């Protein structure tokens, strides 16, 4: 990071801390649900406001820095709100507000138990996500990454059914294993650099003369470390299992915060630790591309076979996350910009679909695709939003998904790999194949047992419709994210 | 006056209190506990203030009776001994605050006074071992604390005499090995003073007699620290001893052996001797790696919480041994930091086990369920935090121990050791998570309910403040010490590194 563009500010720290502080208030007001939900919403608005206040500087390419104390010799617990971090934080904190509203509708609609625990850990997760977004070095990153791992667990097992407990164990087995591999990679990096773990543009390890025997295992450790959360195949299988969690958890954490923390971590490792030079030298970019292509196609194919709506969406997430992996693997500025756009846009679209799935489950008790005949007639707003989100995921204009996919394809062609653009087209078709039948069932088939059923409560419908509109708006006016992603990618590859 | 005799003060304070307690108890039995507590508090304060005396890296020497070494006995306060005495005294203080109720519950009235007297003797032994600069004097203190510990274990439940006997036999063997080592050392060098020996050994070189002496001393310390495969006495002793004993012994007892190992290997012998001439460091590293795996796997199979923690201790001693065996600055820093970290974690966990025994009447894992959490939310929360620390998740202390040890392993290109350290976190996750999952997710068991009255099973019944506060202080310290570990490492731990290792520092 260019030293002239770094200014000292505690705002990133407050953005992390605000929801942790809210946890205390949430726990204290567990007997008064309305007050408790007020704290969640207040923390969400405060957090979003804080991140927004970082935005103008980030758009100018400046970085807010908050340095705390040393946690390892020579390494500080430090936060840096660089454009890349602000982009991720903006998406996560913005969607948290909508998810909180939706959670209120969902949890109360289903009369769920232990709502205090639910809202408390949700707030912890968001703090950890902000920490990941703003982490200035690998130690800080790992700290928040592991907190996110642990804080998500109580949300996954929320139902406390045997199935949920099994899913929780599987989740922990995957993510804790990934955590130790990431620690191994970090320790190794620490040794190689002689006690430096800072994220540095172009790669912390870029200047070191590493042999293949060091670079390749190190890359694999990093990849496995962040690959589980970004659900790169074959490390993806915890994600569909984790769908037993309440739908808002699947929506925000398993479409936005947790999995995007994984791909965000991949971006950090690839461009701020290892560096594009090193990846290219040892042809590790090819490895990333192969993994991404396999995951994109297999994920879509597996999604076709799922009858459970949330599992279908989960496989879709698996496949879409690898768009970003693909963008990283292309190792070029335009590709990274497209990947970061997809990080934001996929979040908005996928959260819409999950919200819709949750609304259907709450109002109609239907979780399988085969039961969705005719639901569009009774829940027109929900299914209209679903349609918008689905069209966007397929990458059709004028929705947001089109923008990111178009630029990704263009970057692939420009990078001399036109076949990858073909993969994207094929994946778009597969997306249509697993999403459009749902719309067709909902609107054009006659359903049973729907008489007298109505739309879900406003707490749920308003957020899901807002996210649907947002995916349309971002498709028409993607400039903000374009500029931010451009700033984030600037200087990573020499010339953009 | 005080600064020069600071090294001798803490062992003598405990020795004196140990003698005073039976006398004072003739007047008033209650006095025994308060005297023990006051002595430990005083010793903790002295030990903590000693740290500041040696922060400049210079040692304070005290010559007993005014006899200069190597003729007389010398006590040395250097950064390492200041750090280790602080750890053992502060942890003992916290555990003793907790101990009042459990000792009342575990022991009949008549045994309480001698119990506290023995605790004082044990503490005197621990402090003496750490402070002394003389190998024979170290043996004396080793036997003082071992003898006290046999008694402290034996007053436990029905099976404890057998456990204590087993401990006695193995402990005696360990003591004899050590004494033999000291004898050989004296035969070959004519000195027993550590600093003096360092100078003599540098001239003598690797004579067979010296190597034999080293081997015997290591065996002795190995048994005392329960380094695999010399751990046989530990599981039973920890399991059947009274709560207070196991909570004192587990965090502190084995660490003394580890401390002795560090003193002998790095402060008497030169680095080249232990890594190349006679590669004992490598042997210790591999044994420790085996200990980590063995302890963790055994811990998974245990049903009794205290026994699980005992096997976990064997694994954690393996961490310390591994750090020593790596024989590089970061491994050693990790090992010494883990003496503190593991002390805090294990003390916290054993106090939790004690709290369960107090309120639920047992600490069997298979009988724990949500009811335990509903009754004792704070105790179970402390356990959960300590479990996360044992797994090694940041920002708890466990993560940072793991970090320095892993760094030491990477420095030596010891990839197998790195893999074992990391695998061990996952194994820890398996056996601790098994318990934590029961607190939060296991519905109340039907069979249990029938056996009790409705009043006993409903409502919150957390332990009293004098038991809860120590548990929570230890749990909170896991976070605080974790976040401040860089201060500790740079402020104290890097200062004690022996000259040979300090040169390797990056």
Image: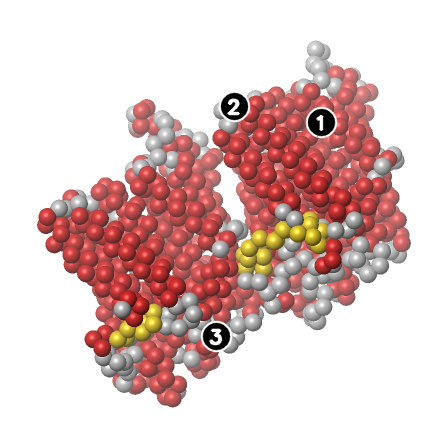
Callout 3 and callout 1 share a chain: no
Residue with the mark numbered 2 = A32
Residue toward you, B473 or B42: B42
Residue toward you, B329 or A200: A200
- Res A142 seen here: yes
Residue visible at 32% across and 57% down in the picture: B45
Residue toward you, A466 or B371: A466
Query: What is the secondary structure assignment of the residue under circle 3?
Result: helix
Is B297 displayed left or right of A479 in the figure?
left
Residue reaching furthest to the top: A452
Residue with the mark numbered 1 = A463
Pinpoint residue A48: horizontal percent, then vertical percent.
68, 37
Query: What is the secondary structure assignment of the residue under circle 1?
Result: helix
Q: Residues within 10 Å of mark 2 (few under 14, many from 20)?
A: few
- CA gap, disc 2 to disc 3? 59 Å
Q: Disc number at residue B466?
A: none
Pinpoint residue B337: horizontal percent, then vertical percent.
44, 61
Is A403 displayed left or right of A34 in the figure?
right
Callout 2 and callout 3 share a chain: no
Residue visible at 42% across and 43% down in the picture: B382
Residue with the mark numbered 3 = B501
Q: Mark 2 or mark 1, which is nearer the start of the sequence? A: 2
Residue visible at 39% across and 79% down in the picture: B269
Q: Residues within 10 Å of mark 1 (few under 14, many from 20)?
A: many
Pointer 1 chain: A
- Res A129 seen here: no
Q: Nearer the viewer, mark 2 or mark 3?
A: 2
Pointer 3 chain: B
- CA gap, disc 1 to disc 2? 23 Å
* A167 is higher (above) or lower (below) than B419: above
Q: Are marks 3 and 1 in contact (CB under 8 Å)?
A: no
Query: What is the secondary structure assignment of the residue under circle 2?
Result: loop
């Amino acid at each position: 990071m260019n030293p002239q563009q770094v200014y000292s500010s505690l705002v990133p720290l407050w953005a992390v801390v605000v929801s942790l502080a809210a946890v205390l208030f949430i726990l204290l007001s567990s007997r008064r649900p309305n007050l408790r939900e007020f704290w969640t919403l207040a923390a969400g608005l405060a957090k979003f406001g804080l991140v927004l206040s970082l935005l103008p500087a980030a758009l100018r390419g400046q970085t807010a820095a908050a340095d705390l104390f040393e946690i390892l010799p020579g390494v500080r617990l430090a936060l840096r709100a660089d454009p890349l971090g602000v982009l991720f934080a903006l998406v996560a904190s913005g969607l948290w507000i909508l998810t909180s509203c939706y959670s209120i509708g969902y949890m109360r609609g289903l009369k769920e138990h232990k709502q205090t625990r639910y809202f408390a850990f949700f707030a912890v997760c968001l703090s950890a996500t902000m920490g990941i977004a703003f982490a200035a070095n690998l130690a800080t990153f790992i700290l928040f990454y592991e907190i996110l791992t642990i804080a998500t667990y109580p949300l996954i097992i929320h139902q406390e059914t045997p199935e949920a407990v099994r899913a929780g164990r599987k989740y922990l087995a995957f993510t804790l294993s990934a955590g130790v591999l990431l620690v191994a990679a970090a320790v190794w990096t620490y040794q190689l650099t002689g006690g430096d773990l800072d994220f540095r543009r172009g790669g912390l390890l870029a200047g070191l003369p590493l042999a293949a025997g060091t670079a390749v295992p190190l890359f694999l450790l990093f990849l496995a470390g962040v690959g589980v959360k970004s659900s790169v195949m074959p490390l993806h299988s915890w994600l569909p299992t984790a769908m037993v969690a309440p739908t808002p958890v699947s929506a925000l954490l398993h479409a936005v915060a947790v999995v995007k923390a994984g791909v965000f971590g991949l971006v950090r490792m690839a461009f701020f630790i290892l560096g594009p030079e090193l990846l290219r030298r040892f042809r590790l970019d090819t490895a990333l591309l192969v993994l991404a292509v396999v995951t994109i196609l297999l994920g879509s194919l597996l999604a076709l076979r799922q009858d459970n709506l949330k599992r279908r969406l989960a496989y879709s997430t698996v496949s879409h996350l690898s768009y970003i992996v693909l963008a990283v693997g292309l190792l070029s500025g335009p590709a990274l910009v497209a990947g970061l756009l997809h990080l934001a846009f996929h979040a908005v679209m996928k959260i819409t679909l999950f919200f819709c799935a949750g609304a259907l489950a709450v109002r109609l008790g239907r979780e399988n695709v085969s039961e969705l005949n005719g639901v569009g007639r009774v829940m027109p707003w929900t299914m209209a939003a679903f349609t918008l989100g689905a069209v966007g995921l397929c990458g059709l204009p004028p929705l947001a998904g089109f923008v990111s996919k178009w630029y990704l394809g263009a970057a692939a062609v420009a990078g001399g790999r036109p076949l990858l653009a073909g993969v994207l087209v094929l994946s778009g078709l597969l997306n249509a194949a697993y999403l459009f039948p749902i719309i067709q069932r909902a609107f054009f088939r006659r359903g049973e047992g729907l008489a007298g059923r109505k739309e879900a409560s406003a707490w749920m419908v308003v957020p899901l419709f807002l996210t649907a509109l947002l995916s349309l708006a971002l498709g028409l006016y993607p400039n903000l994210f374009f500029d931010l992603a451009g700033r984030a990618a600037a200087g990573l590859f020499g010339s953009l | 006056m005080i600064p020069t005799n600071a090294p001798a003060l803490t062992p003598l304070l405990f020795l004196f209190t140990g003698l005073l307690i039976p006398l004072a108890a003739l007047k008033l039995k209650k006095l025994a506990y308060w005297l023990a507590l006051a002595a430990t508090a005083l010793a903790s304060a002295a030990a903590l203030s000693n740290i500041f005396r040696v922060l400049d890296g210079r040692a304070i020497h005290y010559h007993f009776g005014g006899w200069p070494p190597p003729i007389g006995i010398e006590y040395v306060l250097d950064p390492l001994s200041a750090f280790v005495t602080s750890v053992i005294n502060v942890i003992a203080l916290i555990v003793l605050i907790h101990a009042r109720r459990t000792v009342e519950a575990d022991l009949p009235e008549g045994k309480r006074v001698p119990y506290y007297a023995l605790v004082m003797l044990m503490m005197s032994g621990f402090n003496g071992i750490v402070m002394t600069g003389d190998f024979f004097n170290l043996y004396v203190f080793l036997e003082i604390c071992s003898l006290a510990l046999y008694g402290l274990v034996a007053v436990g439940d029905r099976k404890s005499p057998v456990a204590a006997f087993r401990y006695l036999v193995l402990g005696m063997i360990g003591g004899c090995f050590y004494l033999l080592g000291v004898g050989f050392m004296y035969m070959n060098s004519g000195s027993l003073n550590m600093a003096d020996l360092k100078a003599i050994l540098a001239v003598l070189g690797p004579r067979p007699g010296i190597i034999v002496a080293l081997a015997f001393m290591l065996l002795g310390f190995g048994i005392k620290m329960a380094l695999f495969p010399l751990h046989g006495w530990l599981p039973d002793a920890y399991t059947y001893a009274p709560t207070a004993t196991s909570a004192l012994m587990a965090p502190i007892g084995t660490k003394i052996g580890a401390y002795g190992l560090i003193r002998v290997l790095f402060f008497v012998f030169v680095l080249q001797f232990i890594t190349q001439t006679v590669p004992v460091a490598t042997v210790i590293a591999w044994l420790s790696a085996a200990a980590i795996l063995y302890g963790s796997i055994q811990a998974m199979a245990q049903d009794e919480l205290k026994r699980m923690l005992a096997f976990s201790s064997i694994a954690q001693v393996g961490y310390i041994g591994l750090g020593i065996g790596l024989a590089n600055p970061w491994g050693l820093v990790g090992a010494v930091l883990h003496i503190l970290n593991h002390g805090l974690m294990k003390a916290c966990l054993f106090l939790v086990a004690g709290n369960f025994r107090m309120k639920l009447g047992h600490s069997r894992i298979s009988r724990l369920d949500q009811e335990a959490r509903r009754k004792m939310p704070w105790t179970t929360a402390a356990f959960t935090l300590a479990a996360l620390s044992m797994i090694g998740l940041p920002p708890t202390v466990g993560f940072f121990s793991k970090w320095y040890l892993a760094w030491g392993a990477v420095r030596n290109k010891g990839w197998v050791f790195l893999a074992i350290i990391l695998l061990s976190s996952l194994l820890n996750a398996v056996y601790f998570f098994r318990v934590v999952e029961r607190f939060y997710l296991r519905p109340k068991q039907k069979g249990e309910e029938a056996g009790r009255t409705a009043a006993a099973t409903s409502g919150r019944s957390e332990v009293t403040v004098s038991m809860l506060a120590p548990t929570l202080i230890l749990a909170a310290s896991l976070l605080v010490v974790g976040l401040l570990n860089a201060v500790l490492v740079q402020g104290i731990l890097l200062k004690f590194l022996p000259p040979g290792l300090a040169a390797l520092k990056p």
